[in-house]
Structure formats: structure tokens, C-alpha cells
Image (spheres, rainbow, N blue to C red):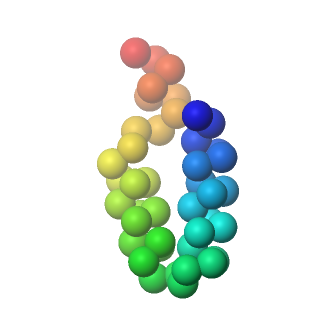
Amino acid sequence: IDPTLIRLGLVFICLATGLLPMSVAYIIGWIIIPPYSDINNT
């Protein structure tokens, strides 16, 4: 799945449910998930 689609989905959910819970989840995912360039280099 394209990371851009996941981010757009998270933004939509964030706006639909409230900013705080999804903002925290997005930041945690941003820290945990490696950048796309790191995935392709392995």
C-alpha cells in the first residue's frame, strides 16, 4: 500500500473523529515506520 494513501486516510479519520487521538497515532507511526527510501534500499 502506498504510504501517501495511508497518510491521506489518517488525515480524513483525524478530521472526522477529532484532532488529538489521531494526531498522537500519526506521530507515533511517523516515528516507528521507516521512510520510504529506507525500505527500497534494503
Left or right side of 22 for 7: right
Q: Residue furthest top?
A: 42
Above/below status of 15 relative to 42: below
Give x and y (percent) for residue 6. 58, 49
Above/below status of 4 relative to 39: below
Q: Quadrant of the C terminus?
A: top left
Q: Quadrant of the N terminus?
A: top right
Give x and y (percent) for residue 32. 33, 48
Left or right side of 18 for 38: left
Given residues 26 and 13, the one toward you in this image is 13
Above/below status of 7 relative to 20: above
What residue is at 47 percent from the left and 38 percent from the top? 35
So how many labels did they put on this image?
0
Give x and y (percent) for residue 16. 63, 78
What residue is at 40 percent from the left and 54 percent from the top? 29
What residue is at 55 percent from the left and 80 percent from the top? 17
Given residues 40 and 26, the one toward you in this image is 26
Left or right side of 16 for 38: left
